[in-house]
Image (cartoon, rainbow, N blue to C red):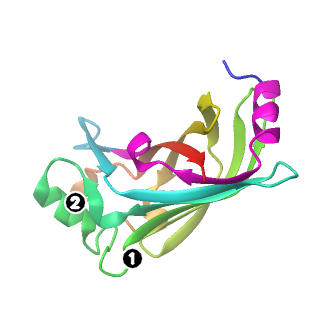
Amino acid sequence: MTTIADIQSLVRDSQGTWTLDPAGSSAEFHVKHFWGAITVHGRFERLAGEGTVAQDGTLTGAIRLDAASLNTKQKKRDQHLCSADFFDVDHHPTVTITVERLTPDATGRLASQIRLEAAGQSQTISPTIEVAQVQPDAVTLRGKVTVDRAAFGMTWSPLGMAARQARGIITARFTRA
């Protein structure tokens, strides 16, 4: 388990610019469907991003997901998710996760303030981020969040079959730039 001292040391030794490694990163989403009987699993296949650790230890950055790259392994559903009922990729081609603040907390994790932008809507969320792996020139962070998809205008759900809550899991591997 990562301790607060480990994270403080990591932050102190990590000043500078970091680049997201798409091959070591993933962005997944999960939504209960058919009144909770099944879960639709999906992922965004293309993502990019960067992060900065300032001299004062402030961590900021952004991860951009190509909304049209979403994949649930069902082409027709993917096309519908790209439509105006959901991500509206014709008008909003990118889902952006902007890290406004990350700070070590007492549990050895990073408390966060993040702005999530999707389908032309924006919401501030505060997931806890875990430090999954640390190497000399790479760090992998993992965050989990549950959002109300209606806050992003994604309300399509005939007969209320789809849950309003969507879970997201981001694994972000950054390397020194």
- Ranked by sequence position, the earlier of labels 1 and 2 is 1
Quadrant for residue 24, please give it. top left
What percent of the width, then of the height, locates residue 163? 35, 48
User: Residue 98, how many percent across, how many down?
Assistant: 60, 61
Q: Is residue 25 in the magenta section?
A: yes
Q: Is residue 157 above or below residue 25?
A: below
- Residue drawn at x 13%, y 51% is 74
Report which residue position mark 1 lands on: 92
Q: Please give the count of numbered marks on the rendered protein.
A: 2
* Residue depicted at x 52% and y 59%: 49
Residue 136: x percent and y percent? 65, 32
Q: Relative to 166, is 94 above or below? A: below
Would you say residue 39 sits in the magenta stretch? no
**Depth check: 124 or 110 in front?**
110
Please identify the residue farthest to the right as the structure is shown: 56
Q: CA distance from mark 1 to mark 2?
A: 24 Å
Residue at the spot 56% in from the left edge and 54% down from the top edge = 19
145 relative to 46 in the view: left or right:
right
- Give the magenta-colored segment's residue range: 4-30
On residue 158, which mark appears?
2
